[in-house]
Image (spheres, rainbow, N blue to C red):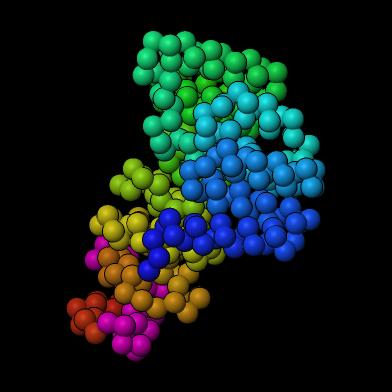
Amino acid sequence: MLDRKLQLDIRIVKFQDLIGRKPDRPFGYYGLGVQYMLSGKPNMADRMFTQALNMKPGYMPAILGKLEILLMEKKLVSAVRFYQKNSDLFRRKKIYIIRAQRTTGSLYAGKFFYHYLKTIRSVFVFNETIGALQRMFNADRDNPVVNLLLAMFFLKEDKENERAFILYNLCVNMEGIPDKLRWDLVKILSKNNPDILKDEKIAALFSSIPEGVLGNPYASFILKQFILLNDMDRIDRAITEFHNKNYSPDSKTMWQYIDFCRKNDIWNSTVFTCCQKLIEYGWIDRTVAEAVIELKNRKITEHTRSMDKILSLYGYI
């Protein structure tokens, strides 16, 4: 298997070749810029994105690339201004805004936030940056880049003032942000608004069960939304998280998962485990009974003797 550096080098050569064959196409310059960015060469990447934009002004892949570089290089105020300058282009398609939110939110997991606090001079730079961002927020609350940056800073500092909660509420509904960030926003907002833990729209925005949620009833609530959406990929990821950490959804959600699998002709050991747990808890109905019988008929499992006795007692077999 090729190592990552060699893979990047090969892709760089391919995009250079594409530019040589089709020098009037912005995609080649954009693609080469992405490879330079992945290779840790932001200046060269920025030149490629600029070249793509010179050829096709308003070319959104390159605009998104330049935004990502500004954020990677900790040029936060410049990133906010860049988004504002191109806000009309971002608003043309929802996916562009989502990508901008995803790029900004991705900073949350790293050591990014206190990069400026290593020296005395950095404290000054840090405070100046936060002040500038807050002034920009005052001028425009529709800029997701500044909203996310401030919300993430405030979360890291455990701020719970009025401005912080305004930002948290603006960001918790954003599509594309990392699950960990959304969960931290939900947690802090739930202190004043417990009903947010029952908000189906917010729970449906998670891509899986975020870190730190397993063991909390909210994990089952998230899985329930995935089931209601019939989103198999997210259901699988969530079930895998439960399994890997030796947790189980609550009884009602397990029943919904079994019912979903029956309707979609999905039969596996996880369905059996859920049936087994529900029977142990005393939850016995036709859905569970028929799932156990089908699993046995398909030879997914053969260890159903004790379960068969209980189902027979209730008249299901």
Where residue 228 appears, x then y in whole percent?
54, 60
Whether 114 is among the magenta residues is no
- Tell me what residue is drawn at x 67 percent, y 51 percent: 29
Residue placed most toward the observer, 51 or 289: 51
Residue placed most toward the observer, 161 or 13: 13
Where residue 267 appears, x then y in whole percent?
39, 78
Q: Is residue 98 above or below residue 228?
A: above
- Tell me what residue is drawn at x 41 percent, y 38 percent: 109
Residue placed most toward the observer, 178 or 312: 178
- Tell me what residue is drawn at x 59 percent, y 19 percent: 133
The image quadrant of residue 19 is: bottom right
In this picture, which residue range is highlighted in magenta? Answer: 280-301
Q: In this view, does 249 lie above or below 212?
A: below
- Tell me what residue is drawn at x 33 percent, y 79 percent: 292
Please identify the quadrant where the C terminus is shown: bottom left
Please identify the quadrant where the N terminus is shown: bottom left
The image quadrant of residue 112 is: top left
